[in-house]
Image (cartoon, rainbow, N blue to C red):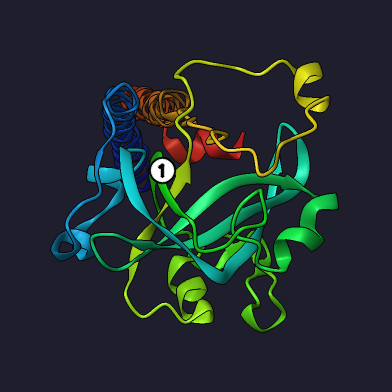
Amino acid sequence: MAGVTLFLAFAALGIWQVERRDWKLALMQRVEERLHATPRPLPARADWPHVDSKGYEYLPVQVQGRWLTGKTVLTQATTELGAGFWVLSALQLDAGGQLLINRGFIPQAQRGTWAAGMADASGQTGGHVQIQGLLRISEPGGGYLRRNDPTQQRWHSRDVAAIAQTLGLRDAAPFFIDAGIPKPGASSDAATAAAYAGPWPRAGMTVVHFHNSHLVYAITWFGLAAMVAAAALAVTRYELRIRSSDVPVQTLQNR
């Protein structure tokens, strides 16, 4: 009975991994198609609550508005340019509402300048801009073993709701935009990246990569199920041989 239970459990896990693999491949195809699409207007405000990763993650969009003075936070980032921060600034949309824009990466040395709330690279605030980028879903909570601490301005993830509340944004979209649209399949040379000296922040650094090991996991689970089945078969055949033998079972056990 235990063998049957284990076999069914392992087989079910294998089937689940196959289904997960199909889901992941479909997601990767959708994202690839989106990255090649022409930037479109932001979803209407009435649709904001329904924006999710399945339908909108990495969707190229174009927005217009003006930067809000002093409405900038820095979140921890690790990129091909090293450790530093993402610069998230609030944009007052021409169509109404506010939107957090990830303007790009800055190194540690630039923290003091941008932490002061500077709105653009020239130091001007309140300027009208048009931005193209990728729609991204909020990252609530924080990083691995590190929680966001709004009171200390320590952000380890781009938690839109918490950042909007901290900045006093009363009509903010529940998602954010990564400024700049990276070219699909493009990769940066490590030496070139290390030598990059600005201007800051550097946009277009969104990494679109999906880890897909579901086939390996599926093979593992199906392999375990096969092992359980083989072991059960061997035990069954052994018991059948014992029962068909003329020698009493008790006699065999006492040998």
Disc 1: CA contacts within 10 A as few (<14), some (14-19) or many (>=20): some
| Vertical position of residue 147 compared to residue 218: above or below | below
Percent x, y for residue 181? 45, 31
Q: Quadrant of the C terminus?
A: top right
Where on the picture, by quarter, is residue 149? bottom right
Q: In the image shown, does 35 or 91 lie closer to the viewer?
A: 91
Percent x, y for residue 56? 27, 44
- Which residue appears at 39% of the width and 40% of the height? 134
- Which residue appears at 62% of the width and 79% of the height? 150
Identity, as a three-letter code, of the amino acid under mark 1:
Ile
**Tag 1, which secondary structure?**
strand
Percent x, y for residue 43? 20, 52
Q: In the image shown, does 50 or 16 lie closer to the viewer?
A: 50
Q: In the image shown, does 50 or 125 lie closer to the viewer?
A: 125
Question: How many marks do you count on the picture?
Answer: 1
- Which residue appears at 41% of the width and 43% of the height? 131
Q: Is residue 11 visible?
A: yes
| Vertical position of residue 14 compared to residue 136: above or below | above
Percent x, y for residue 41? 23, 44
In the image, taking residue 183 as reference, residue 172 lies left or right, namely left
Read off the residue under disc 1: 131
Q: Is residue 4 visible?
A: no
In the rendered image, the residue lying farthest to the left is 46
Q: In the image shown, does 230 or 193 lie closer to the viewer?
A: 193
